[in-house]
Image (cartoon, rainbow, N blue to C red):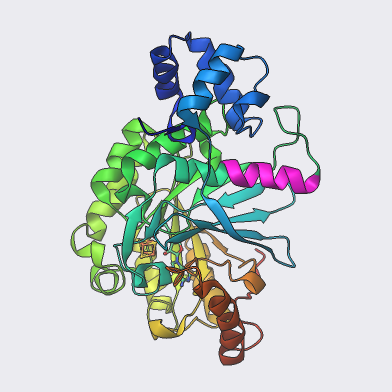
Amino acid sequence: MTALTNLLDLDPAQLIAYCNELGEKPFRAKQLQRWIHQFGASNFEDMTDLAKSLREKLSGRAYVAAPAIISDHTSTDGTRKWLLDVGQGNAVEAVFIPEERRGTLCISTQAGCAVNCRFCSTGKQGFNRNLSVGEIIGQLWMAEFELRKSKGVEPGPKGERQITNVVMMGMGEPLLNFEPTVTALRLMLDDNAYGLSRRRVTLSTSGVVPMIDKLSQECPVALAVSLHASNDALRDSLIPLNKKHPLNELMAACKRYLEFAPRDFVTFEYCMLDGVNDTDQHAKELVQLVKNVPCKFNLIPFNPFPESGLTRSANPRIKAFAQVLMDAGVVTTIRKTRGDDIDAACGQLAGEVQDRTKVQERMKKMDEYKRKFGENFGKIVEVTR
Ligand code: SAH
Ligand code: SF4
C-alpha cells in the first residue's frame, strides 16, 4: 500500500502535477486548492463541484491535515497561541496577534533551532527537526479557519480574512529549512490560496548570508534580520553563526536583497540586553554599521528566561537607545510585547516543550517568572514618536 499524500504539502505546481497523475486537468487542481486553502475544507466529500469519481480517488490516496492542536490559549489582549504537535514529543507554536486593521500570525519553521543564540530559549533546546511544508502552511491554514470559526466568519473568499500578515518569527531559523519554507511562502502568496502580498509576509533570519541571496531569487518577501549587536566581537558572542557570516557580509547581503525585495528597507531586529548591547556607544556604532543599508530598527525588549543569565534593559535605557538611532535619522520602533499572560512573546515559544507533559509545567513556570521578575514581566510601554 502506498502512503497517503497530505495535500497541504503541495505547492500550486505540485498540486497540478499530482492531479495530472490522477488523469485530471490543471483547473481541477485550482478548484482543489481553493477548497483547501480558501474554504479550509479537509473532507473531500464537501468539495461538491469536484466529480464524484475524483473525490473517491482522492479519499483513497490523499488527506488534508495540519499538526494537531495540543493547546489553544487566548490572552486578555486578544493574542491567541496554539501549541501544535509535530510528532515524537516535539511541539511548535503559532501566535495570532490582532491589531486594529490587521491580524498577524507568527509561525514556526523548525522544531528547535541549531543556531543557538545566547538569548533565545528555542536555541537552548537544540535542534530537533525541520518542519515539512504541510506543517508550516498548516499553521496558517489551521489558524485562519479556527479564527473564523470562533468569530462566526464564513469560510471562502467572501468571509473576512482574519490573517492579513504572516511573520516567520516563531521557532527555528527559516533559511536553514529553505525548500519547505519557500514552498510554504509560495502558497501564502498564491491567489488561489491565501493571496497575501509579498509586503505582508516577513521572513526573519539570524543572517544565513548565502540563503538570503537565494531567497531574493526564489521568493523575495519582506526581510527582517536579527542584528542584536553593533560589532563582530559582540555578535560572535550572541549569535554563533556570525563567525561564519560576519557583519560586513551580512550588510552586503541586505543591500543585494533590497534590489529584489517588495519593500525598500530591511527591518533590523535588536534584542535589548541589559549591559550587553544597549549603551549609547552601541547605538552610535550601529548608525555607522547600517549607514549604507536602507533600514528600520525594531528594538525588542528581551524576554528573560533564567537559564540565559541575561536581563532586559530598563525602559528608559531602551528609549534613550532608540533616541540615538532616531536622532541619526534611523526609523526606530520599540516592540510592544503581547500575550504576556500566555507566554507568547518572542523567544519564549515552546522553549522546553519537547514533551507534552511539560505544557502544564510551563504554564506554572510563567507564574514563577512573574514572581522572580515582577508583575511587569513581559510588559513594556510602547514609545510614541
Ligand atoms: N530564527 C529567526 C526567526 C525566529 S526568532 C531569527 O533569529 O531571526 C524571532 C525573533 O525573536 C528574532 O529577532 C530573535 O532574535 C528574537 N528573540 C529570540 N529570543 C528572544 C528573547 N528571549 N527575547 C526577545 N527576543 C528574542
Ligand atoms: Fe534560532 Fe532565531 Fe532563536 Fe537564534 S534567535 S536560536 S536563530 S530561533
Occupied quadrant, residue 183: top left
Q: Can residue 219 be seen from the camera position used here? A: yes
For the N terminus, give its image quadrant. top left
Residue in the foreground of this view, choosing between 121 and 209:
121
Is 264 left, or right, of 155 in this rendering? left
Counting from the top left corner in percent of width and height, residue 131 is at 39, 49
- Outermost residue, front side: 1
Residue 196 against residue 320 in the figure, above or below: above
Magenta stretch in the rendered image: 141-151
Residue in the foreground of this view, choosing between 319 and 11:
11
For the C terminus, give its image quadrant. bottom right
Taking the image as four quarters, which one is ligand 2 found in?
bottom left
Counting from the top left corner in percent of width and height, residue 251 is at 30, 52
Is 265 left, or right, of 363 in this rendering? left
Residue 63 part of the magenta segment:
no
Occupied quadrant, residue 43: top right
Q: Main secondary structure of the magenta part?
A: helix
Q: Can residue 191 be seen from the camera position used here? A: no
Occupied quadrant, residue 381: bottom right
Counting from the top left corner in percent of width and height, residue 198 is at 51, 35
Counting from the top left corner in percent of width and height, residue 207 is at 31, 55
Question: What residue is at 46 percent from the left and 45 percent from the top?
Answer: 136
Residue 146 part of the magenta segment:
yes
Residue in the foreground of this view, choosing between 285 and 373:
373
Residue in the foreground of this view, choosing between 138 and 189:
138
Question: What residue is at 42 percent from the left and 33 percent from the top?
Answer: 4
- Outermost residue, bottom side: 372
Residue 270 against residue 119 in the figure, above or below: above
- Outermost residue, left side: 244
Residue 163 against residue 195 in the figure, above or below: below
